Image (cartoon, grey):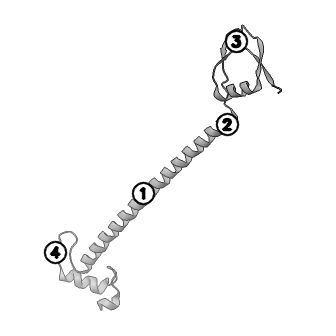
Amino acid sequence: MLIGYVTQVCCNSQCGIAFAVPSSWDAQKRKDHTNFYCPNGHSQHYTEQSEEEKLRAERDRLAQRIAQRDDEIRHQRELRAAAERQLSATRGVVTRVKTRVANGVCPCCKRSFSDLRQHMATKHAGYAGHDEARTA
């Protein structure tokens, strides 16, 4: 069985010794980033991310962005639903007020005025959604 070797140079600037390690051992150290030592005892380790780690980090970043977008979509849907409920409630209030005015009731003091009812029926028949055929 043939074992491949990788040459290393100690990262300590005062040492600089060259040494060889098995390729599989070097690959494992690059993957797990654990410490190893030169023949003179200086501790060192690989700091650069492996391709697998870079891909995993990119995947995690993308998953985080997707989750943020999903949260934003959910929030916007909730805002839209609240706005639609508010619009529906406002339409109901406007319809109620228009109907009361068309029936001759003052929207401020809640008193009924037959003149107002007659005026609304003859001059503004479509005001509260009534067509002229029904009021004539």
User: Which numbered disc flags the more N-terminal residue, 3 or 1?
Assistant: 3
Q: Which residue is mark 1?
A: 78
**Element type at marker 2?**
helix
In the figure, is residue 130 to the left or right of 116?
A: right
**Element type at marker 4?**
loop
Q: Position of residue 39 (x, y in %)?
A: 72, 11
Image: 115 above or below 35: below
Q: Nearer the viewer, mark 3 or mark 2?
A: 2
CA gap, disc 1 to disc 4?
A: 40 Å
Q: Which residue is mark 2?
A: 52
Q: Dot 4 surroundings within 10 Å: few (below 14), some, or many (20 or more)?
A: few
Q: Amino acid at mark 4?
A: Arg
**Element type at marker 1?**
helix
Q: Which mark is residue 55?
A: none
Image: 40 above or below 118: above
Q: Amino acid at mark 2?
A: Glu
Q: Which mark is residue 12?
A: 3
Q: Which mark is residue 111?
A: 4
Q: Are marks 1 and 4 in contact (CB under 8 Å)?
A: no
Q: Nearer the viewer, mark 4 or mark 3?
A: 3
Q: Position of residue 85 (x, y in %)?
A: 36, 64
Q: Are marks 2 and 1 in contact (CB under 8 Å)?
A: no
Image: 38 above or below 82: above
Q: Dot 2 surroundings within 10 Å: few (below 14), some, or many (20 or more)?
A: few
